[in-house]
Image (tube, rainbow, N blue to C red):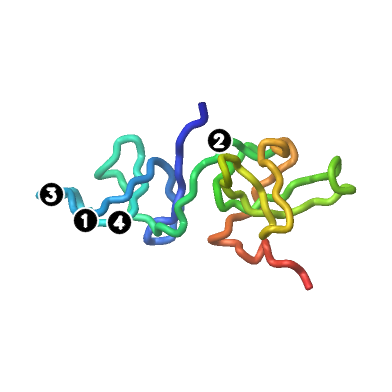
Amino acid sequence: MRPIEFRAQNINGAWVFGNFNILKEKLGNVTVGNVTAGSYISNSAGAPFAYKVRPETVSQFTGLTDENGKKIFEGDIVEIDVHDHLDGNVIKGKVIFLEGAWLVTDSGSFAISLWSEINEIEVIGNIHENPELLEVAE
């Protein structure tokens, strides 16, 4: 069974990892730090060790690591050596979750199962910090 883990940028721009929770309203009369409604990533201890995060940066761990041992998250940009598939090409794509499977896609022209390429894949960035990595050279 794969571990459930999330990552997101906190409101200061730093990446944090752990459990994800959306707080829709203040927790009654309980005051723990500056806890307000919003999206949070916390460690296993939970509040007060939770970080308010930018909801658009929340991504889930796929349960897989790349060839260097780096965890692969939804929204990562990866390079895949597809020498056995497409004449020795290296392709770039974004990790997505679609219809129950983790896929790598290059904006729609192809999609390949993340599981099938696990030994030949490297995380090179993510869509939040490195969107230019997915731009097509003209």
**Disc sitting over residue 63 in the figure:** 2
| Mark 3 neighbour class, 10 Å CA radius: few under 14, some 14 to 19, many 20 or more | few
SS category of the residue bearing label 3: loop
> Measuring 29% from the left and 40% from the top, which residue is drawn there?
46
Compute the Cα span from label 2 to label 4: 26 Å
Closer to the chain start, of discs 3 and 4, is 3
Closer to the chain start, of discs 2 and 1, is 1
**To which residue does mark 3 refer?**
28
**To which residue does mark 1 refer?**
34
Label pair 1/4, CB-CB below 8 angstroms: no
Residue 50 picture location, percent across and down: 31, 47
> Measuring 38% from the left and 41% from the top, which residue is drawn there?
19
Closer to the chain start, of discs 3 and 1, is 3
Nearer-the-camera pick, 116 or 57:
116
Residue 71 picture location, percent across and down: 57, 40
Label pair 2/3, CB-CB below 8 angstroms: no
Compute the Cα span from label 3 to label 4: 15 Å
| Mark 4 neighbour class, 10 Å CA radius: few under 14, some 14 to 19, many 20 or more | some
Viewed as shown, does residue 74 lie left or right of 106? left
User: Which mark lies nearer to you, 2 or 1?
Assistant: 2
At label 3, the amino acid type is: Gly
User: Which mark lies nearer to you, 3 or 1?
Assistant: 3
Compute the Cα span from label 2 to label 3: 35 Å
> Measuring 80% from the left and 51% from the top, which residue is drawn there?
90
**To which residue does mark 4 refer?**
38
**Disc sitting over residue 101 in the figure:** none
